Amino acid sequence: MTGAEVANALFVATILIYAGAMFAYAVEYAFDKRAPKRAKQVAAVGAAGADARDDDAGEAPISPAAARGAGRLGLILTFLGTAALATSIVTRVIHTGRWPWGNMFEYTVGVALAGMVTWLILVSRGSVPRRLGLFATFAVTMVLGTSVRVYTEAGPLVPALDSYWIVIHVTAAIAASGILLIGCVFAILHLLKRRYDRQVSDGKPVRFPLNVAERLPDATALERMTFKIHVFAFPLLTFGIIAGSVWAHLAWGRYWAWDPKEVWAFIAWVVYAAYLHARVSGRSAKANAPWIAILGYAVMLFNLTAVNLVFDGLHSYAGV
């Protein structure tokens, strides 16, 4: 097998391993009784209702101990899949003899790696419950699956990208995008949990998909983690944009050309700045801050997909 074929095989293996991890996390999320489940609703219905639910829990097809074992397996698979993905990227580097961020496919794979490394750091430090790996692996698997649509054969860089600035600018942008992906996941989980708590406190029925939030951590903890992730990623995003501006000056003779890629990167930066401002402002602004964070990542996705595939500009290199 050639280096490119090995890299592709490892890429496919990564998707399969992450899918297995996602299933294992789902088992822990659903059946581990230590996870919070309808705490407010239990208090509302009284001891009789609580006893009935405990009886139902005892009849679960998977014991809590087995569920926690599945969660540990999920974490092992996540480490294994991340190692396979990193090895795939390194193998591609060895095969091509260049930095691996030369096209949209490679960029997207880098975002997935950065996102999963971020998640593993958080769970290894005990900052987040392991069972939330269900949502992290789902997001990263979707990113990897989408990247297949723009797959590009391993080859040399086009001359316009053959610069040491690709290491600085694109690596910073990839790292920021991967970290913000996990931040977006937590923002969505926070909104789901907040909505779930409101439904329960109002005595309204909770139906799918909102009832998925019953085992999520406290909404305040999710919101706090969302903020911490964005605070860490925002300076990295800022640095990536500044580095791109310096590279533009060296390549095109000007720091800013109002290229579509530049414009939408700046829009994303403004949206994330608005999120951070809203988060530290009054109560009403803080309540809307997670929506702004999600909008920020939607802009990032638009810049990665629509701007790359639809708009012509100075950043249109090597097809996609």
Image (cartoon, rainbow, N blue to C red):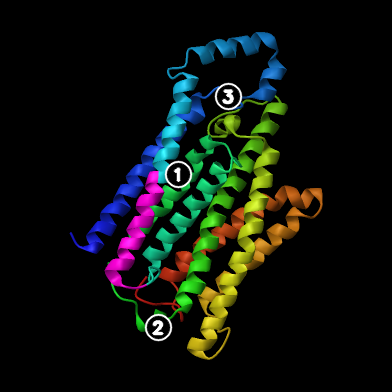
Place of residue 313 in the rendered image (x, y in percent of width and height, measured from the top left): 46, 80
| Tag nearer the camera, 2 or 3 | 3
Badge 2: residue crowd in 10 Å (few <14, some 14–19, many ≥20): few
Does residue 273 sit above or below 208 in this rendering?
A: below
Between 94 and 205, the one lying in front of the other is 94
Furthest-bottom residue in view?
253
Number of disc labels = 3
Place of residue 89 in the rendered image (x, y in percent of width and height, measured from the top left): 36, 61
Specify start and end residues of the magenta stretch as a single range. 80-98
| Tag nearer the camera, 1 or 3 | 3
Place of residue 108 in the rendered image (x, y in percent of width and height, measured from the top left): 42, 61
Between 105 and 119, the one lying in front of the other is 119
The answer, for residue 238, to whether it is visible in the render is yes
- The secondary structure type at the circle numbered 1 is helix
Q: Earlier in the sequence, mark 2 or mark 1?
A: 1
| Amino acid tagged 3 | Arg
Does residue 24 sit above or below 156 in this rendering?
A: above
Q: In the rendered image, which quarter is residue 212 located in?
A: top right
Furthest-left residue in view?
1
Q: Does 78 sit left or right of 302 as displayed?
A: left
Q: Which residue is mark 3?
A: 34
Q: Which residue is mark 1?
A: 138
Residue in the picture at 52% in, 67% down: 173
| Screen quadrant of the C terminus | bottom left
Q: Which residue is mark 2?
A: 160
Is the stretch drawn in magenta largely helix, strand or loop? helix
Badge 1: residue crowd in 10 Å (few <14, some 14–19, many ≥20): some
Residue in the picture at 34% in, 77% down: 157
Q: Was residue 34 drawn as part of the magenta stretch in this picture?
A: no
Q: Earlier in the sequence, mark 1 or mark 3?
A: 3
The answer, for residue 268, to whether it is visible in the render is no
Between 223 and 302, the one lying in front of the other is 223
